[in-house]
Amino acid sequence: MANFAVQAIRNVVLIGHGGSGKTSLAEAMLFTAGAVDRMGSAQDGTTIMDFEPEEISRKATIGTSVAFCNWKGNRLNLIDTPGFINFIEETHAGMRAADGAIMVASAVHGIKAEAEKLCEYASEFELPMMVFVSEMDKDLADFPKTLEEIERSFRKEAIPLDIPIGFGASLKGLVDLIEMKAYIYENGKASEAPMPFGMDAEIQKYRKKLVEKIAESDDNLLSIYLDGGEITKEEIINGVKTGSITGQFIPVAAGSSVKNIGADRLMDAIVLCLPSPEERAKVSPPEGKNAKTGEPEKRLPEVSAPLSAYVFKTVADPFTGRLSIFRVYSGSISSDSSAFNAATGARERVGQLFYPFGKKQVPVQGLGPGEIGVVAKLKETNTGDTLSDEAHPILFEKVKLAEPLISYAIASKSKGDEEKVSSGLHKILEEDPALQFHRDEETKEMILSGMGQLHLEVALEKLKRKFGVDVEMKTPKIPYRETVTGASRVQGRYKKQSGGRGQYGDCWIEVKPRPRGAGFEFIDAVVGGAIPRNYIPAVEKGILETLKEGIIAGYPMIDLSITLFDGSFHPVDSSEMAFKIAGSMAIKKGATEAKPVLLEPIMKVNIIVPEETLGAVIGDLNAKRGKVQGMEQSGNNQKIAALVPMSEMLTYANQLQSLTAGRGLYTMQFSHYEQVPGHLAQKIIAESEAKRKKEE
């Protein structure tokens, strides 16, 4: 079953930095297409796409949402995504369902670092992209400057399809450079008008750029153009479509979402410039692996093909249960049927199907290739899973999300709620795979990790709202480690006599440091039966248990070699327990004499910042004991590679936002352990000792 011909579908993801106007643009398109009877406002919290309480209170998109409209015989599925760096992995996951992307770039603020990251994600999915220059109604709007930034950031020519008539309060309409017609807008309605006075040179400049780009793409057209001939409107249209879909250039539209200027022109451009599922499959057919054989397999967007659908978003609702939003790639799926989850091997009962429309759902009997739908209460299906025909199971690759940047320890405010916290958070994690949650065995803390402090705060707000659990966040403990820098040879001798059978264990060990990252090594060098073979594992066990507790500050010891080379035993009083205790005594003494030191985790950090904030960011890294490894140009920004202690990076997301006015972003991963500077180590050891005494 298919409700729309696959050629008439456009699955479009709206991307761009936070505050660029994506949600307002979606609202303008839905209103212009007649999908809603009034335009909502992001400031008032009345838009179709931003409906979660956390989004309304912050006036910002936090989660991916989907709505649809019909435009001139085409079905446009609009996927609205977050732009703030804390939620950018949500956008990453949502882009998987699209066939094309619209980058929304503010004519006031230009291209920010987040937009460049999103462009990388679009390239990952091979998504053709066009740009909508928003906020042309603002006083500081600068269309030519924004075009320059687009070209510099994305390293492709930006070709306007229409240009604004005026800017700021004087913004009146647009000039269509393909048709060479002017349109003036009143209350969101466009009417054709004479070409604006005084814009001839500007119009001709951009028209020439468009025609030349089309001519360059075809030898015959180039010959006609160089001979002074005219390229027809049909040839220009075909050239724009081909050049856009193949990524030869970036088509650019412009307007104002708030004044609803240009939404109609943009929807025309979407139909022209961005591919249908069928057109995209010709360039980049959907490919997965056969779930039975593991062999690569392609699926064309045809109704007659076996079912394949990818779940790109999950919503956890305490009342209606789990909602799974999915994109059908091939075949069809019907309400009240079944599907096979190729990722889990589970057969899922499919109930009523719906089209997603913001927080609402529109019932539908079935969905065909290219369509986006939602279904409730799939029991064993999560974000990233593939639904398919059981006889022809296919598995699409899941989107690889970035590792979390920041972690906090969390604790319930009410005693006894730990189980509710864990249960509720696992449901929140179904919605947001960019979050990670675990209980740290070393510190016994519940740890929630995400892309920034705001990311975690929003997750905990949802936890309280949806599942009635209130928690507080605390800075987690740093996983320091201990090691030795010298060598020692010591005896561990345990002897206890208290009437009857006694306890006797005696061992000699040598302690040596190993290279960083080499781990623990136990060498059995006992000869001549000094210690019976059955007691040697007990010595090792006693050593390992003591190493977990540390020697100087209570942190596990790593990267050392222990050689057991001698000892003695008693034929009656020796036992495994006695040798275990002897091993423990030996390592405590041996590690203490082998110059123990404290180690801290060092993180590999990549930071992208605007050129003008580079000095401030470098200075801040130096103050954090960071070591800059290198710098390189990245579009309008600078990319910094550095090694920084984890203890200095716990709240870095907030600090970087402050240093760069919200325009910087970073990624971070563990690199290695290094020795803590002496003055800091003394402080950490003293704090550990004070805590130990308090607990005694």
Image (cartoon, rainbow, N blue to C red):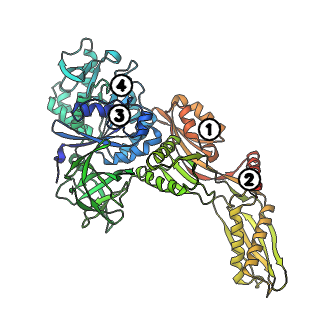
Given this view, does label 1 or label 3 mark the residue nearer the observer? 3
- In the picture of the structure, the residue carrying the numbered disc 2 is 691
- In the picture of the structure, the residue carrying the numbered disc 3 is 22
Q: Secondary structure at mark 4?
A: loop
Image quarter of residue 622: top right
Q: Which mark is residue 621?
A: 1
Instruction: Return the x and y of residue 684 as percentages of the image width and height.
Output: 73, 49
Kind of residue indicated by mark 3: Lys
Given this view, does label 2 or label 1 mark the residue nearer the observer? 2
Given this view, does label 4 or label 2 mark the residue nearer the observer? 2
Q: CA distance from mark 4 to mark 2?
A: 56 Å
Q: Is residue 437 left or right of residue 111?
A: right
Instruction: Return the x and y of residue 575 as percentages of the image width and height.
Output: 75, 82
Image quarter of residue 17: top left
Q: CA distance from mark 4 to mark 3?
A: 11 Å
Kind of residue indicated by mark 2: Lys
Mark 4 or mark 2, which has the lower sequence index? 4
Q: Residue at x 34, y 66 (%)?
A: 345
Instruction: Return the x and y of residue 219 as percentages of the image width and height.
Output: 20, 36
Q: CA distance from mark 1 to mark 4?
A: 35 Å
Q: Which mark is residue 135?
A: 4
Kind of residue indicated by mark 1: Leu
Point out the image quarter for the N terminus: bottom left
Mark 4 or mark 3, which has the lower sequence index? 3
